[in-house]
């Protein structure tokens, strides 16, 4: 299994556990809020680099 596949399986398992323990809406808030807060804590240069990696920059 690829690294992305393992991450996806782990994310689904974490979401199921989170929804089961705290409820759907609170779990959804955590699943969306934590990555959004982490992104906002990055410096502008780090955000630019992250966007470039997600677009799979050509020429590298």
Image: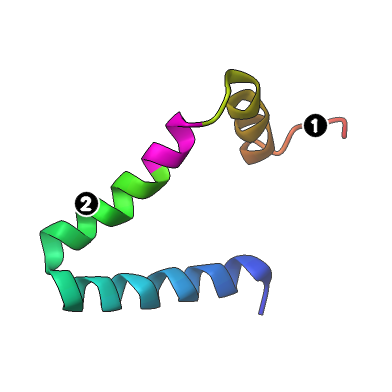
Q: Main secondary structure of the magenta part?
A: helix
Mark-to-mark CA distance, 1 and 2 = 35 Å
Q: Which mark is residue 9?
A: none
Instruction: Please say whether residue 42 is one of the residues in the magenta stretch.
Output: no
Residue to which mark 1 is pinned = 58
> Residue, x 31% and y 49% (percent of image)?
32
> Residue, x 58% and y 74% (percent of image)?
6
N-terminal of the pair, mark 1 or mark 2, is: 2
- Indicate the quadrant where residue 20 lies: bottom left
Where residue 44 appears, as percent x and y from the top left, is 58, 19
Residue to which mark 2 is pinned = 29
Colour approach in the figure: rainbow
- Secondary element under disc 1, as helix, strand or loop, is loop
Dot 1 crowding, Cα within 10 Å, few <14, some 14–19, many 20+: few
Instruction: Please say whether residue 38 is one of the residues in the magenta stretch.
Output: yes
In the image, taking residue 42 as reference, residue 28 lies left or right, namely left
Q: Nearer the viewer, residue 41 or 24?
A: 41
Q: Nearer the viewer, residue 46 or 55?
A: 46
Dot 2 crowding, Cα within 10 Å, few <14, some 14–19, many 20+: few
Q: In front: mark 1 or mark 2?
A: 2
Where residue 49 appears, as percent x and y from the top left, is 68, 29
- Secondary element under disc 2, as helix, strand or loop, is helix
Q: Which residues are magenta?
A: 36-41
């Amino acid at each position: 299994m690829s690294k992305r596949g393992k991450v996806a399986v782990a994310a689904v398992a974490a979401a199921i556990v989170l929804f089961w323990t705290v409820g759907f809406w609170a779990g959804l808030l955590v699943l969306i809020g934590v990555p959004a807060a982490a992104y906002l804590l990055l410096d502008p240069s780090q955000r630019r680099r992250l966007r470039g990696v997600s677009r799979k920059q050509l020429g590298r």
